[in-house]
Amino acid sequence: MLKAAYSLALREVMRFLRQKNRVIGALATPVIFWFVLGSGVGRSLLEAGSRTRIDYLSYFFPGIILLIILFTAILSTVSIIEDRKEGFLQGVLVAPAGWAAILFGKLMGGTILAVLQAIAVILIAPYSDHHPDLRVIVSLVGVISVLAIGLTALGFLIAWPMDSTQGFHAVINLFFVPLWLLSGALFPAGGAADWVKTLMRFNPLSYAHNALQELLATKPGMPLPADLSHDISIVIAVTLLLVMACAFQVSRRS
């Protein structure tokens, strides 16, 4: 099963790398979005309850990493619909490895793509006034990996019962964009309306964004934030629930 899952994951990575426009778009679009919006807002954003102005290029950087993970991990699962139409999915299902190979192969492929792209963007962190050392980078890769597994599983849950790529993209735009907007990626929760704060509190991506933000804000030589374990624990718990839901869904349909 592991060999079959590895082969399917490698297939996802190679499919992505062969599409040069997809590679450029996946990396360039979020970076341009970060630079233009961050430079446009500049220091016009105030911290809630104080007169301290926020450097938006610095604040927005964790949100762009989150956006890259979100769309790379989720959009990698659109291949499930394409594979079903081509008959490839049915062929794998009748193989000895069966549904387990499909599930773990897709999760591995989406996670690898998301982690590689996120690492590429982390390399420009100094331009956003973040200077992570090796310890922080290793911690970031760990958080990104867990988050990528969870988001790929979420995309898998939506893509598995669908037969239309157009329908899949419609659900993505309706559901996942608000998830990102309400994660704290664009604005801090402190100055938001009460009902928005409530939504952000129950949004798992908020805790993922907090973890990324806290890690990037850690100066070289400083200890890791005390609240980090709380945020990561929630991300891990949600990821496990999503993977178990995927396993139940696929095993039932197979």
Image (cartoon, rainbow, N blue to C red):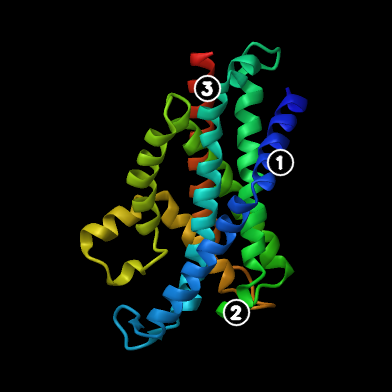
Residue 38 located left or right of residue 111: left
Residue 84 located left or right of residue 19: left
Image quarter of residue 12:
top right
Check the image and name the residue furthest to the right: 3
Q: Write down the residue under mark 1.
A: 14
Which numbered mark, 1 or 2, is in the foreground of this view? 1
Check the image and name the residue furthest to the bottom: 51
Viewer-proximal residue among 21 and 215:
21
Check disc 2 and give the amino acid type.
Answer: Tyr
For the N terminus, the image quarter is top right
Dot 1 alpha-carbon crowd within 10 angstroms: few under 14, some 14 to 19, many 20 or more: few
| Distance from the alpha carbon under mark 1 to that under mark 3 | 20 Å
Q: Write down the residue under mark 2.
A: 127
Which numbered disc, 1 or 2, marks the residue that appears first in the sequence? 1
- State whether residue 227 appears in this view: no
Check disc 3 and give the amino acid type.
Answer: Lys
For the C terminus, the image quarter is top right
Q: Name the residue at 40% across, 36% down.
A: 166
Dot 2 alpha-carbon crowd within 10 angstroms: few under 14, some 14 to 19, many 20 or more: few
Residue 63 located left or right of residue 193: right
Q: Position of residue 98 (x, y in %)?
A: 64, 16
Q: Position of residue 224 (x, y in %)?
A: 61, 68
Q: Position of residue 38 (x, y in %)?
A: 44, 76
Check disc 1 and give the amino acid type.
Answer: Met
Viewer-proximal residue among 186 and 248:
186
In the displayed structure, 68 sits above or below 97; it is below
| Distance from the alpha carbon under mark 1 to that under mark 2 | 30 Å
Image quarter of residue 225:
bottom right
Which structural element holds mark 2?
A: helix
Which structural element holds mark 1?
A: helix
Q: Name the residue at 56% across, 78% down.
A: 128
